[in-house]
Amino acid sequence: MSAQGDSAAGGYDGRMQGERPDETALEAALERIGERWALLVVDALLEGPKRFSDLEETVPGIASNILSQRLKHLEREALLVARPYQKRPVRFSYELTAAGRELAGALRLLAQWGARGSGEAALRHATCGSALEARWYCPTCARTVDDAEPAELRYL
């Protein structure tokens, strides 16, 4: 890159060094969730409360120390609660809060997207067997909003 492109604007993207745009809604969500193991733990807990050993079995490949860290992080973010079920040694059962259960929709969207790229079976409607599709819906306009109208979409 030329020196001319970096000079007056403060960098290649035109922002002054040290300036940070406001955090987006997606950045805020990712900050609360963490990474893939946290999402897999939340997914496992959507079935209902589980003990640590149950989670180790339900989330294959997760190391005990990583699971412990993710559970603590999700608890700090108020996405799950840890309830003691044994005093000596203290052992906990983990359950999603209402905020944690709200992630179900986002996880379904990610799973749908992943199924398209991996050849896995999509989520299907039990009544007719058709693959389900997620759509954005505006209750005020009483219509589905499609991807072709991004100028009409905004975070508040």
Image (spheres, rainbow, N blue to C red):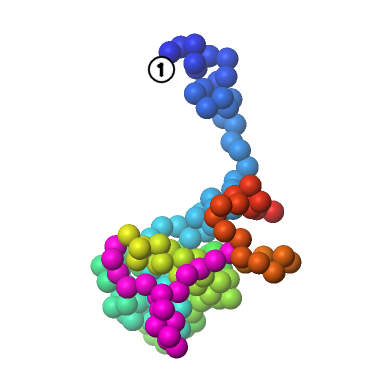
Residue 34 position, x and y percent, is 45, 57
Dominant SS in magenta: loop
Residue at image position (40%, 62%) is 113
Q: Which of these two is toward me, 153 or 53? A: 153
Horizontal and vertical percent position of residue 43: 42, 73
Q: Quadrant of the C terminus?
A: bottom right
Tell me, yes or no, whether the highlighted magenta stretch contains residue 85. no
Q: Which residue is mark 1?
A: 1
Label 1, secondary structure: give it: loop
Give the x, y percent position of residue 140: 73, 66
> Residue 27: x percent and y percent?
53, 50
Q: Which residues make up the magenta segment?
A: 118-136
* Location of residue 69 by image quarter: bottom left
For image coordinates 45% across by 74% down, the residue present is: 132
Q: Nearer the viewer, residue 121 or 46?
A: 121
Q: Quadrant of residue 131?
A: bottom left
Task: Tell me: residue 29, above or below residue 19.
Answer: below
